[in-house]
Amino acid sequence: MTTYGITLLSGGLDSTTVTTYAKSRVDSLTALTFHYGQTHSKEIQSAQKIAHMLGIRHELIDVSFFSKVAWYSALTSPDLFPMPKDRPLVEMGVSIPITYVPLRNTFFLTLATAFVESEALHSIEIEGQDPAQIKTIILLAPNALDYSGYPDCRPEYYDKISQALMYGSKMWTQYGIAVKIDTPIIHMSKAEIVRLGIKVGAPLELTWSCYEGGEVPCGGCDSCILRAKGFLEAGLADPLLVRLGKRNEQGTL
């Protein structure tokens, strides 16, 4: 049995943890990183370093045109929409913030499925592999607990989108190969994700979670706040801040 796997690697804490987790569980693993017109390339640079350190195949996909259609977001149109800063934790998850990028995960999952389906079809139709000996999986890192209210981070979304992608694919229609969407951290707290990342040996010191692309994390965006909360509750120092020689708001490295 051969498993062809795709992991969506943004360069952040969560996706790096999931990618490292996937490395020992998938026979043929490819990490995809999308340049979708986001405001900075810091996370892309982090993803490249992380994939290299993990020794896995990495593909950087340029879909920068996406920012033209998914323009209603602070991540794709920073000149139009200011980045929310210093939001209280109680506000996160109550409403969908302006950092939400319209249908981003739906777009990414469609591309990832096309990639892994191409791998499976080539294996069957060109290399002659038995379809019954092939599995496909897409791993990604949404989280439904410590998150900013994004609708495409909910378990019910992934239940629906996996069915749509399966029924729209040749590998399912003709060969009976389902695409499995695995979201291993979707029910974890940020502290649990931090502990998992440490356990699997993820290079967390190379990750970048901040919505801004400065030399150091801004500390005020939702992503920075949630990351700091996770390390604080896990009782661990953030390896990125340690590497940068910086301290978080709690005064610990």
Image (cartoon, rainbow, N blue to C red):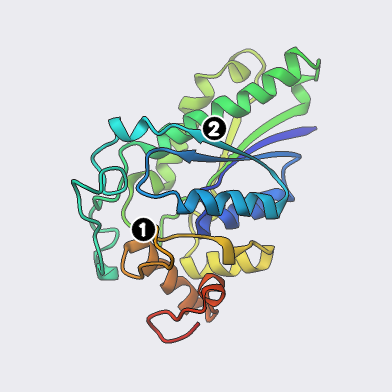
Q: At 36% from the left edge and 30% from the top edge, which residue is drawn?
A: 65
**Above or below 83: residue 198:** below
Residue closest to the far left: 80
Give the class, few, some or many, for how many residues have Cα within 10 Å of label 2's Cα (few <14, many ≥20).
many
What amino acid type should be assigned to the residue bearing mark 1? Glu
In the figure, 235 relative to 138: above or below? below
Q: Which mark is residue 112?
A: 2
Residue 246, horizontal then vertical, whole percent: 47, 79
Residue 41: image location, x then y, percent: 44, 49
Helix, strand or loop status at disc 2: helix
Circle 1 sits in a helix, a strand or a loop, which is it?
loop
Q: Is residue 139 above or below residue 94?
A: above
Residue under circle 1?
212
- What residue is drawn where x is 40% and y is 34%? 64
Image label count = 2
Residue 47 vs residue 43: left or right? right
The numbered dot on residue 158 is none
In the image, 178 versus 227, the foreground residue is 227
Q: Looking at the picture, how far across and down is residue 211, in whole percent? A: 36, 57
Residue type at the position of mark 2: Ala
- Answer few, some or many: residues within 10 Å of disc 1's Cα (few below 14, many 20 plus, some between 14 and 19): many
Give percent across and percent down for residue 232. 46, 79
| Circle nearer the viewer, 2 or 1 | 1
Q: Is residue 178 visible?
A: no
- The residue positioned 48% from the left and 39% from the top of the image is 34
The quadrant in which residue 116 appears is top right
